[in-house]
């Protein structure tokens, strides 16, 4: 107001006379108390004074005065506003100039950062704390052939399944637990990349860069170094474990390595003692000989004597020349020398033993000359000892025996003799029977010798043939008895040949009676029976029971043939060394049992098919679902572009549904991993209160939506326990989610934690409808989701995961529920999981 008054005063001074200005100034000063008479007068006096003032100003009326005052006020306000506007524009221009300079500085810094980032092929993904939408910078073509950069987060689109899952777990550990990692990966296109995850400035940074140049060479050299180091350790460990002395010497001849056997042979206290003292295993002449051989042909091999602890032993010494020295090994050959001497003595003993046999034995060398005969051979043919000692040929002996009419008469003696001498070129033994002119029968066995020649064994079989005839008569009686049996019966001799069989045996196995009359071996019978039954293991068991020497026990087994018939098979050893084999058809009695078993197997097969199908489908769904989630996040990013409210609403539905589906698939994959035995626990100290807080945070929105109260009671559970914290939180979350799902509105869920005797116990109680008795055994099964009249809807995997994770820790899960009284699930964790190796 003071500014307006001053402006009016200046306006009046410019347009009025001096007298008028004086009067106007007096009038304007009246409201401020400058004129005592006017200030103390009443309203009538003020009005008269004001009229006199107007008259003094030139006779203007009140309306003109008001208009003049208003115009002056507007003029003053405009002038002041113009001044203020100019000052504001000046300050704005200065601020704009300062901000432009700052923008240019930041743009230069940003350009430098991008230049450093793009100086090599790499991609950087950054997550801010609490933000699920990452920022991606770099060259995405390093990993993706085409597509948006957001597809980088769908690791399954450019990585194989196993490294994709490994990278996902590593990223999850980085974001949730600040666990740094470094992985070497190979993309589907064959590129070798390095994935490094770290926490920088409160952000989770994931960087991909191609392994090339020096980095790739360094990685390959590291791999080669590790492989060579491992190979060296294996070779050194192998050399240390060898019971034979092993040593390595440098180019100057000093000892650089010796194993414990070398130290023992040189009477050193240890390998280090042998190296420090440079002990030698061989004598000086042998060492010089080995040095000359190594200098000439780079290898040395010779059997040399070595004195060890006063005992002389023979060693096979092998040495080779290396680039930086020599290496050698000495293998104890004393036992081999002793064995050679023992073999010589054994051969002499065998000769003496053969000389005592009643069977005639003659040994001919490769030139078909006699080199050994026993006394039984001389007596059998009544030959002169002097003649036999001259080493006659096989043909000369046969000619003399023919002349004395002691061998069978032959139509073509030359051809018969040539056929007999084929044994010298044969690799298998040959059996013949000679019927001598004096009525005796000889069984002749000609066996080729490994070093050349033939050994003849002549055995008088006259008496045995008579016994065989008697035995055949007995067999005929037994055959007549067996023919009247309904069971299939066959008798096999100790040599495995069928001696007896009844018609039921031939009918049951659809065999020819004529073929069985030929006394086939059990192996031949097996081949004939294979069209009906080809179980090699069962036949091998039967062959062992029939032809075995040590195992002469009875055998009972049940077999099923290809025609569907079931047979009870039994073997019984007989006193004469033969084996009785019987088959009884029990098809009718097994049909009912088979039907029940097939039904049970069908149910088990269906269950396995269901589990395998779930495993496969869950894994196949995860990759495209991860891609959908990535694109949904990409669409919700403001940088992609604005969305309509309806599109934003639909996108939120998509995100919520895909997250729920991903959680179900992750649960299924966890169960599949546990079922396959491939899941391992990341054990550590777990804080009870922290685990409860993390689990309850995941159900807060559902608690608020359904107006459910969560009470947490921790009784004496302040000490941490050893477990996998992530799996413990997952167990508690599933228990709380299950309890909230079954609780009514305005209900109450209680989570209790306690510790007794080193065991940590969690229990979750709800006020839901309870579980019927017939459903208690099924609640922990896969996909067993029983709403039981509540609003709960789910995949039925939560309690299955709870039981699996708790049992992996060596704990147990129990459930207490009744219809109408709610449910309490209790999980008990041991003080220390099995095989954890961690002290609680």
Image (tube, rainbow, N blue to C red):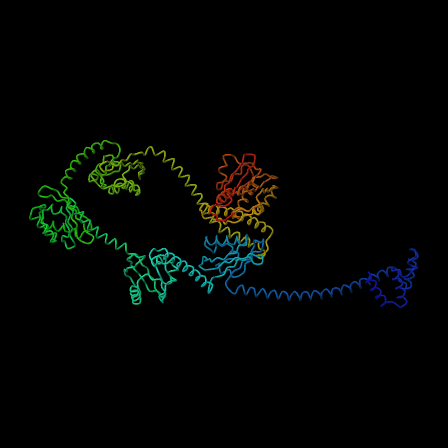
* Quarter of the image where the N terminus is located: bottom right
The residue at the far front in this view is 310
Question: Considering only vertical position in the picture, is 468 above or below 287?
Answer: above
274 left or right, relative to 837: left
Asked which quadrant contains residue 337, the reply is bottom left
Q: Quadrant of residue 504?
A: top left
Q: Quadrant of residue 29?
A: bottom right
Residue 675 lies, in percent from the top left, at 45, 45
Q: Residue at left 40%, top 37%?
A: 600
The front one of 394 and 704 is 394
Q: Position of residue 21 (x, y in %)?
A: 88, 66
Q: How many marks?
A: 0
Is 152 in front, or is 676? 676
Q: Nearer the viewer, residue 532 or 434?
A: 434
Q: Position of residue 606 (x, y in %)?
A: 42, 41
In the displayed structure, does residue 209 sit left or right of residue 7?
Answer: left
Q: Position of residue 215 (x, y in %)?
A: 47, 63
Of residue 721 and residue 548, the one placed in the foreground of this image is 721
């Amino acid at each position: 107001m003071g500014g307006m008054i001053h402006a009016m005063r200046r306006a009046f001074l410019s347009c009025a006379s001096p007298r008028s200005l004086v009067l106007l100034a007096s009038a304007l000063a009246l409201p401020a108390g400058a004129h005592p008479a006017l200030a103390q007068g009443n309203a009538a006096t003020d009005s008269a004074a004001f009229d006199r003032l107007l008259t003094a100003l030139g006779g203007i009326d009140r309306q003109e005065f008001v208009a003049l005052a208003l115009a002056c006020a507007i003029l003053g306000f405009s002038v002041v506003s113009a001044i203020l506007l100019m000052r504001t524009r000046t300050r704005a221009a200065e601020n704009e100039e300062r901000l432009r300079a700052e923008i240019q500085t930041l743009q230069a810094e940003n350009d430098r950062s991008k230049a450093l980032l793009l100086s090599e092929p790499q991609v950087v993904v950054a997550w801010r704390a609490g933000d699920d939408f990452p920022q991606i910078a770099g060259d995405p073509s390093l990993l993706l052939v085409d597509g948006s950069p957001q597809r980088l987060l769908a690791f399954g689109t450019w990585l194989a399944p196993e490294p994709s899952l490994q990278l996902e777990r590593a990223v999850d550990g980085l974001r949730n637990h600040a666990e740094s990692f470094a992985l070497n990966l190979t993309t589907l296109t064959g590129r070798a990349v390095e994935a490094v995850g770290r926490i920088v400035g409160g952000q989770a940074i994931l960087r991909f860069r191609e392994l090339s140049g020096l980095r790739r060479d360094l990685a390959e050299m590291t791999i080669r170094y590790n492989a060579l180091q491992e190979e060296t350790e294996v070779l050194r460990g192998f050399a240390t474990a060898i019971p034979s002395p092993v040593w390595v010497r440098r180019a100057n001849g000093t000892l650089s390595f010796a194993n414990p056997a070398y130290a023992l042979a040189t009477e050193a206290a240890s390998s280090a003692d042998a190296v420090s003292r440079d002990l030698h295993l061989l004598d000086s002449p042998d060492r010089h000989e080995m040095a000359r051989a190594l200098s000439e042909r780079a290898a040395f091999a010779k059997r040399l004597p070595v004195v060890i602890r006063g005992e002389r032993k023979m060693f096979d010494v092998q040495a080779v020349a290396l680039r930086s020295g020599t290496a050698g090994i000495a293998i104890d050959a004393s036992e081999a020398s002793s064995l050679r001497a023992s073999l010589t003595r054994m051969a002499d003993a065998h000769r003496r033993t053969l000389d005592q046999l009643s069977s005639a034995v003659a040994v001919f060398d490769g030139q078909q000359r006699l080199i050994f005969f026993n006394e039984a051979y001389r007596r059998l043919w009544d030959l002169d000892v002097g003649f036999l000692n001259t080493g006659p040929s096989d043909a000369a002996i046969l000619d003399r025996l023919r002349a004395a009419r002691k061998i069978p008469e032959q139509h073509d003696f030359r051809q018969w003799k040539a056929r007999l001498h084929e044994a010298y070129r044969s690799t298998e033994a040959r059996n013949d029977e000679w019927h001598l002119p004096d009525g005796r029968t000889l069984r002749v066995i000609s066996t080729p010798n490994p070093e050349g020649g033939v050994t003849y064994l002549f055995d008088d079989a006259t008496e045995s043939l008579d016994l065989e005839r008697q035995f055949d008569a007995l067999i005929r009686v037994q055959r007549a008895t067996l023919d009247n049996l309904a069971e299939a019966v066959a008798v096999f001799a100790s040599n495995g040949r069928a001696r007896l069989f009844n018609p039921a045996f031939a009918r049951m196995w659809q065999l020819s009676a004529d073929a069985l009359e030929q006394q086939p071996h059990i192996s031949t019978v097996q081949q004939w029976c294979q069209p009906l039954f080809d179980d090699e293991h069962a036949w091998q068991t039967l062959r062992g029971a029939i032809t075995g020497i040590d195992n002469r026990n009875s055998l009972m087994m049940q077999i099923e043939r290809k025609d569907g018939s079931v047979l009870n098979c039994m073997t019984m050893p007989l006193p004469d060394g033969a084996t009785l084999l019987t088959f009884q058809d029990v098809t009718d009695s097994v049909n009912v049992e088979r039907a029940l078993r097939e039904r049970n197997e069908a149910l088990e097969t269906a269950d396995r098919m269901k589990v395998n199908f779930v495993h496969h489908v869950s894994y196949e769904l995860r990759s495209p679902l991860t891609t959908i989630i990535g694109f949904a996040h990409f669409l919700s990013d403001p940088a992609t572009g604005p969305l309509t409210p309806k599109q934003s609403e639909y996108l939120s539905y998509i995100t919520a549904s895909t997250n729920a589906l991903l959680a179900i698939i992750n649960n299924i994959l966890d169960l599949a991993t546990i079922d396959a035995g491939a899941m391992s626990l990341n054990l550590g100290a777990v804080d009870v209160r922290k685990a409860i807080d993390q689990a309850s945070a995941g159900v807060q929105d559902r608690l608020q939506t359904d107006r459910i109260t969560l009470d947490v009671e921790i009784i004496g559970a302040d000490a941490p326990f050893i477990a996998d914290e992530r799996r413990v939180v997952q167990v508690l979350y599933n228990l709380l989610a299950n309890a909230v799902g079954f609780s009514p509105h305005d209900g109450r869920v209680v989570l209790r934690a306690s510790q007794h005797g080193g065991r940590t116990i969690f229990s979750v109680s709800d006020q839901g409808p309870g579980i019927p008795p017939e459903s208690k055994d099924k609640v922990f099964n896969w996909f067993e989701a029983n709403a039981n009249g509540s609003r709960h809807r789910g995949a039925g995997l939560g309690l299955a995961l709870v039981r699996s994770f708790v049992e992996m820790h060596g704990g147990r899960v129990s459930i207490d529920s009744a219809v109408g009284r709610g449910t309490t699930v209790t999980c008990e964790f041991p003080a220390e999981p099995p095989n954890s190796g961690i002290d609680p």
